[in-house]
Image: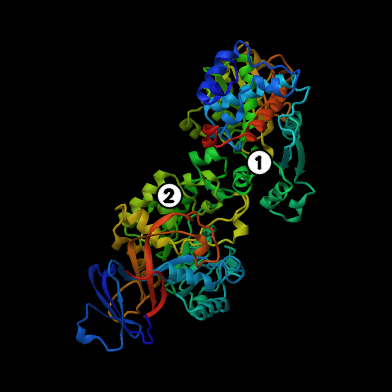
């Protein structure tokens, strides 16, 4: 499959483009890095073209992840920009909005520039820096948001920490409106959750681990929504996971409040029962909740209350997770499994249509950041993924591109195999051969 | 059929039935003249019964297994002449005590139990050890295991550490308390003490009083007692006793005086000051007022109420000295039973066999 040009014809695939409701078997033409046509006639094809037979596969806009963590600079032992973006491609992601919690944090124009250069040098997927909301990510004073935006920060995020200081959040929402940038917040009232390891409930009661109560999230969600209403600012709730949050978001949307809400993929299919073996890879934030919360989240995904599914990718090197669960860091890696998790646990059981799932993985996050991707529209950049939704694979952490191993899904059989990932019309990843 | 023949002891159900039948006839009493074979005569052969290599918690054990463990403890207690003589059931085996949290009684109790069965022990405690030099918990345990030990007994402030070791080590792991999660041998010795006084747990009302949220003893007691048919009440300040326990089959009551008259046993748990990041009640003074077991409360209790405490007790906080040293108190019997329980636990875990092997034999 040698290709010296950027001209491709992908044939016989199911073209799913949630941005325009397209869903049919057909062929897609890529010319010079752009999407040049759906179902072109043979006369429109240039002579120098490579063909891919995508029989049985889905052709979709490349996935876009929000708030991904890598660790470079400062925690290169967890993930570098090179390994993280390679993992992204293998998972079908063509764009990543990288979290600001590096060491030092991304709170200056120079650090934004560093991320962009590293991303360009890695030349895998597109890498969009998120700048800090607060100076040094300390949650006290505003960071130089204007400079960060000027340097290329696509949105502002103090993640994974919540913006605890309500005054700061209010100022940030007002201030950011000048730059038309979105603030990301992880909703959590830390004074209620501090020291917690897992969701408060029956499982937690049995295990004797310190609790993270659902209301720690509900109250923060409620506060954030009120501030959006008051300021008219733009906000994205990165990761909701409770019944209460879903209800609050649903009501706010029905009242016309403009915002988006997201969920980490793990919170869309795993429950707190996963902690029974004290697996530190199941220690995540937001915590894996009980079944009633999970069901509320799935309902929220179905009725559009939850707009975006993110990977929540948070790598931790082996030695950091091979410790007592009380001191282990939060987080799991997920870039390479997110699409398969969604297909296996949401699409195949009939909880979410493939088009809706792809909208939440690609179109909606693209729109939020104002990117050109997330669509297969004519003359848009050819950022796209081809995957076989009916083929299964078994997660083997030893074979993942990510530098870290912290996923509880090791050994799990998942459906959905990414066969090709294109970025700007260049084939940047081809995993399994197409049938 | 003679007691302890292999045929009879192949199945747990059989042995359980046999034990219940023979308990009253004291047929578990074993001769101590020859410490090895006759001592075993009264005991079922463990490897045909016991399938657990690790003792991680009572939540994982069935009622039959708990009863069997208690029976073994009593038999071993008699076989060691009330703990005065040694057996060599574990001769040549090495047991490591890994204590990453302070402990006096549990550590000594495990140590003595191992020695009574003829095992060698390695003692490890975190103060002044490699942990202070930055070695991880798992590496420390692996290093000790590499000294060729057959079992590790572990205490740690984090729930799940024995489970972590069970995953990473090849030897048996016995949980001697993992944070607020479980303390199975404590639960067993509490239950054994009650059984010795009342014959059976079924139908008894046992109240666990105090800091339930941070208590591993409470959790192990709850699972064990429920499985053996007792009614369990958890009682203490609302900040330390979750209403959610009701969903797990436990009665929740915050007023001790309301339940006193119907309790057969009170287990007074220690206030875990060291685990409480924020003091969950206004003052020790107020706690005593509401929950301390004193003479006046004893007078309003059942005549034959048993007063237990897993210790170490805060004298004057959970109970007053006249109650701790009074006629209802069985606190020191608990300590004695601790050694018997730990002998049984070590003996069984070190002789565990997978179900397939057991069937094959």
Q: Is residue A33 above or below residue B218?
A: below
Q: Which residue is mark 2?
A: A242
Q: Position of residue B184 (x, y in %)?
A: 62, 32
User: On the rendered structure, is A392 left or right of B93?
Assistant: left
Quarter holding the C terminus of chain B is top right
- Residue count near mark 2 (Cα–Cα under 10 Å), binned few <14, some 14–19, many ≥20: many
Q: For the residue labelled by badge 1, is the local secondary structure a helix, a strand or a loop?
A: helix
Q: Is residue B191 visible?
A: no
Q: Quadrant of the N terminus of chain B?
A: top right
**Mark 1 on the same chain as mark 2:** no
Q: Is residue B361 above or below residue B97?
A: above
Q: Position of residue A310 (x, y in %)?
A: 42, 62
Q: Which mark is residue B275?
A: 1
Q: Nearer the viewer, residue B8 or A58?
A: B8
Residue at position x 48%, y 32% in the image? B248
Q: Badge 2 sits on which subunit?
A: A
Please indicate, yes or no, whether residue B166 appears anywhere in the rendered image. Answer: yes
Decide: is B215 above or below A199: above
Q: Is residue B189 rendered to the left or right of residue A187?
A: right
Q: Secondary structure at mark 2?
A: loop
Mark seen at residue A170: none
Q: Residue at x 64, y 16 (%)?
A: B28
Q: CA distance from mark 1 to mark 2?
A: 28 Å
- Quarter of the rendering containing residue B289: top right
């Amino acid at each position: 499959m040698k290709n010296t040009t950027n001209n491709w014809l992908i044939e016989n695939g199911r073209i799913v483009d949630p941005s325009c409701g397209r869903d049919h078997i057909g062929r897609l033409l890529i010319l010079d890095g752009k999407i040049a046509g759906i179902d072109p006639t043979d006369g429109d094809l240039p002579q120098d073209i490579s063909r891919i037979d995508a029989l049985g596969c889905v052709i979709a806009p490349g996935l876009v992840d929000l708030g991904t963590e890598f660790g470079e600079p400062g925690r290169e032992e967890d993930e570098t920009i090179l390994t993280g973006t390679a993992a992204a491609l293998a998972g079908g992601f063509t764009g990543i909005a990288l979290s600001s919690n590096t060491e030092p944090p991304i709170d200056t124009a120079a650090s934004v520039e560093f991320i962009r250069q590293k991303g360009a040098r890695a030349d895998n997927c597109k890498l969009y820096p998120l700048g800090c909301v607060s100076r040094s990510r300390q949650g006290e004073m505003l960071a130089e948001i204007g400079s960060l935006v000027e340097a290329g920060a696509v949105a502002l995020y103090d993640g994974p920490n919540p913006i605890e200081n309500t005054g700061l959040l209010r100022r940030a929402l007002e201030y950011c409106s000048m730059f038309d940038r979105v603030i990301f917040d992880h909703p959590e009232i830390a004074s209620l959750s501090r020291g917690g390891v897992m969701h408060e409930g029956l499982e937690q009661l049995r295990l004797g681990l310190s609790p993270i109560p659902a209301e720690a999230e509900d109250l923060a969600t409620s506060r954030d929504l009120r501030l959006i209403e008051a300021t008219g600012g733009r906000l994205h709730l990165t990761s909701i996971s409770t019944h209460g949050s879903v209800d609050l978001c649903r009501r706010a949307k029905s009242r016309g409040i403009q915002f988006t809400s997201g969920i980490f993929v793990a919170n869309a299919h795993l429950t707190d029962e996963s902690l029974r073996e004290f697996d530190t890879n199941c220690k995540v934030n937001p915590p894996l909740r009980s079944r009633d919360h999970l069901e509320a989240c799935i309902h929220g995904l179905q009725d559009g209350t939850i707009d975006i599914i993110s990977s929540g990718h948070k790598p931790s090197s082996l030695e950091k997770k091979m410790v007592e669960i009380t001191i282990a860091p939060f987080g799991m890696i997920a870039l390479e499994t997110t699409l398969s998790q969604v297909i296996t646990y949401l699409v195949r059981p009939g909880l979410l249509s493939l088009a809706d799932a792809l909208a939440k993985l690609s179109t909606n996050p693209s729109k939020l950041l104002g990117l050109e991707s997330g669509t297969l529209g004519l003359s848009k950049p050819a950022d796209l993924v081809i995957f076989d939704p009916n083929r299964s694979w078994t997660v083997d952490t030893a074979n993942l591109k990510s530098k870290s191993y912290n996923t509880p899904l090791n050994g799990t059989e998942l459906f959905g195999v990414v066969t090709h990932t294109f970025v700007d019309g260049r084939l940047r990843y081809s995993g399994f051969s197409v049938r | 059929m003679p007691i302890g023949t292999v045929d009879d002891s192949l199945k747990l159900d059989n042995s359980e039935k046999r034990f219940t039948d023979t308990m009253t006839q004291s047929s578990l009493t074993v001769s101590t003249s020859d410490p090895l074979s006759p001592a075993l005569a009264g005991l079922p052969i463990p490897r045909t019964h016991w399938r657990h290599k690790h003792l991680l918690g009572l939540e994982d054990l069935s009622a039959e297994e708990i009863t069997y463990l208690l029976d073994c403890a009593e038999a071993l207690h008699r076989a060691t002449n009330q703990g005065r003589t040694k057996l060599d059931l574990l001769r040549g085996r090495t047991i490591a005590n890994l204590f990453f949290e302070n402990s006096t009684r549990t550590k000594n109790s495990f140590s003595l139990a191992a020695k009574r069965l003829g095992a060698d022990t390695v003692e490890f405690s975190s103060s002044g050890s490699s942990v202070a030099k930055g070695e991880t918990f798992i590496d420390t345990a692996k290093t000790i295991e590499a000294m060729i030990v057959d079992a590790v007994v572990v205490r740690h402030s984090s729930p799940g550490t024995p489970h972590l070791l069970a995953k990473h080590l090849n030897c048996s792991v016995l949980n001697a308390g993992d944070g607020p999660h479980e303390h199975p041998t404590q639960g067993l010795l509490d239950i054994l003490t009650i059984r010795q006084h009342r014959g059976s747990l079924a139908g008894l009302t046992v109240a666990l009083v105090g800091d339930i949220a941070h208590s591993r003893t409470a959790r192990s007691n709850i699972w064990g007692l429920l499985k053996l048919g007792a009614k369990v009440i958890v009682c203490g300040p609302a900040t330390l006793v979750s209403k959610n326990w009701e969903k797990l089959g436990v009665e929740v009551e915050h007023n001790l005086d309301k339940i006193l008259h119907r309790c057969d046993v009170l287990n007074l748990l220690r206030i875990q000051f060291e685990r409480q990041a924020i003091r969950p009640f206004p003052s020790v003074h107020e706690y005593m007022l509401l929950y301390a077991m004193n003479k006046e409360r004893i007078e309003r209790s059942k005549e034959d109420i048993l007063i237990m405490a897993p210790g170490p007790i805060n004298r004057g906080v959970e109970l007053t000295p006249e109650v701790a040293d009074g006629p209802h108190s069985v606190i020191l019997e608990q300590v004695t039973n601790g050694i018997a329980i730990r002998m049984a636990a070590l003996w069984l875990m070190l002789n565990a066999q997978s179900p397939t092997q057991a069937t094959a034999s």
